[in-house]
Structures are given as structure tokens and as C-alpha cells.
Image (cartoon, rainbow, N blue to C red):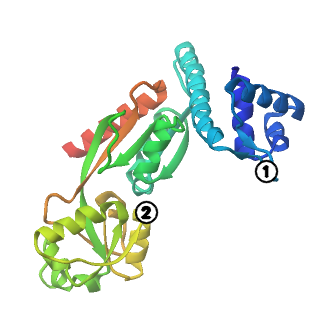
Amino acid sequence: MEIRQLVYFVAVAEKGTITEAAKSLHISQPPVSVQLKLLEEELGCVLFDRNTRHMELTEAGQKFYQRASAILEQFDSARREMRDIESGVAGTLRIGVVSSLCGGMFLDWMKEFRKDHPRIHFEIQEGNTYQMIEKTRMHQVEMAFVRTPFSASDLKRVPILKEDLYVVGKEEFFQKQADEPEQSIALKELTGIPMILYRRWEPLITEAFRKQELTPEIFCQCEDARTVISMAEKAMGIGIVPQSIFRDNRELCGYPIREREFRSEIFAVYGKQTYVSSATRGFLDYVEKQVKQLLIH
């Protein structure tokens, strides 16, 4: 088995046809066809269903695609590692970020880091925590910034920051707080108000209500904290989001939840056995220093 066979296989799997794969690789079609046939013979199984207009992966092909992608990423990582050793500088940071971080403090970290490292470039992939963890496992990103709760014993976890969850909404939903200004809000004060929840936090929130023998009025669940903010801005209900995604919003009122279990922790995660470039490690060190300074002040 050769690296080029894996490259050809992955290209066909992603492009859907040998013609398009060959174009993307800047080679002619025959070498791609020949190497795919040799690969299938060596593996002893059929990787593609060739009876359709596009070449669809068989069940074996889907499994092998995951393995081949990981092998190619490790091969690329090894090349980057050698370049790092030779030059001391890596040019591109491939980082995953949960969407609730992308519009706030993460952009500040990027901006300030690049001032000191103008030759650094970023490749950012966004999604929820589970998606970012999976991309880290598949070596599609070197490191990801994610939020609790999550389980990933196979990854190295670096704690970054704990922050309060805030109840946010239009002023009309917080009349009591407007009349009697307080620094926080209790769960019992949220009963009877339509709530917009980030789906991953729904079990935590409903359990907290249940412990107090309360029932939340959940109007909508969604997959993105930014959607929660957008719906709250339309006065569709109140949302529960991390403090950092709310901090610069001038359209909504916001109050930390009084019950202390409502906190979100940000972690950086990366593979325990995966090479992490010097630039990525440098960025992580920079983020940790920035957060420490923030906590001191």
C-alpha cells in the first residue's frame, strides 16, 4: 500500500468521480483507476459501488475512508513537524472553535496573537462541541476550543476559563429586575416565561428546575448559542447563554443565574498522541496567559 493510493482513494471518495478526482490531483484518469483497482485487490474488498452515476462508498469503503483520512493527516503532520524542526516556525494554525466563542473572545485572541506573529495564518472550523471533538479525533484540526459538558478521555484537556451562564432577553421579560435592580436572577423567577435553550444544556437546566420542584416553559431548543441570541433579540423568549457571547450585546438585558451550578467551562483539546505544531502550542500558551491576566484584573 502506498501513500499515493490513499491520496487517490480519498480524492475519489470526496469528488464522487474519477474524472473530478483526477482534475483535483492534476493528473490523468488512468493512474487513478489503476491504483484504485490495486488498492481494492490488496485489501480484498470493494471500496466503491460503481453501478451509480457517482462512485458511492460501500460500507467497507466508508470505514476505510476514515482510516485513510487519518493516515494522510498523520503523514502531513509528520512533514509539518520536520519543517518546524528545520525552521522553528509553522505558518498555519488549524483550530476548531465552538460557535459561542467565535464571535467574541476568540477573535480577540486571534487578533492580538497575529500582531506578534504576522506570518501566522489561521484555518478555523466552527461547530458544536461534539463536532469539534470529532474533528480533533479525525485530525481535521490540530486543536479545538470546546465547552463543557463533554466526555473525551482520549484527548488531552487544557482548562482555559470558567464563566457564568446568563439569562438574556428583552427588558419586557425582566420587569421585576427593572423595578428592583439585582445582580442575579433565580430559577424560580423564570417560571412562566418562554425559554430558548441550547440543546446540549437542556438536561442540566430541566434537572435544576426539577430539584426545586419547578417546571420550565421551554419554547424552543436549538443547536447554536448564536441562534438563542437572535431569537431573544426578536423578543421570542429568554435565552440562557455563556457570558462571553452576550457581553457586547446592546439589545438585550442579561443576568447571571443565581444557582452556582450554572457555569460553563472552556477547554482546549488535542490528541494525546498527535503532533501539535509549535505555532499551535504558541497560540495555546498565549491564550492561557491572556486569560490569567483577565482573571487578575
* Place of residue 203 in the rendered image (x, y in percent of width and height, measured from the top left): 27, 63
Location of residue 148 with respect to 190 vertically, above or below: above
**Residue 107 visible at all:** no
Residue 104 pos. (x, y %): 40, 55
- Closest to the observer, 107 or 131: 131
Residue type beneath disc 1: His
Residue visible at 36% across and 64% down in the picture? 199
**Which quadrant is the N terminus positioned in?**
top right
Vertical placement of 100 versus 37: above or below?
below
In front of the other: 57 or 13: 57
Whether 224 is drawn above or below 52: the answer is below
Of residues 111 and 254, the one nearer the viewer is 254
Give x and y (percent) for residue 252.
Answer: 33, 75
Q: Mark 2 points at which residue?
A: 224
Asked if residue 75 lies left or right of residue 112, the reply is right
User: Disc 1 marks which residue?
Assistant: 54
Location of residue 209 with respect to 193 vertically, above or below: above
What residue is at 26 percent from the left and 40 percent from the top? 293
Amino acid type at circle 2 is: Asp
- Which quarter of the figure has residue 13? top right
User: What crowding class fits label 1: few (fewer than 14 Cα within 10 Å), some (14-19), or many (20 or more)?
Assistant: some
Note whether residue 142 is visible: yes
Instruction: Judge the density around disc 2: few (<14), some (14-19), many (≥20) Cα neighbours within 10 Å.
Output: some
- Residue 76: image location, x then y, percent: 60, 25
Compared across the picture, whether 198 is left or right of 69 comes to left
Q: Which residue is drawn at 61% across and 35% down?
A: 64
* Mark pair 2, 1: CA separation: 33 Å
Labels 2 & 1 near each other (Cβ < 8 A): no
Closer to the N terminus: mark 2 or mark 1?
Answer: 1
Which element type, helix, strand or loop, lies under badge 1?
loop
In this view, the residue in front, 50 or 108, is: 50
Which quadrant of the structure image shows residue 247?
bottom left
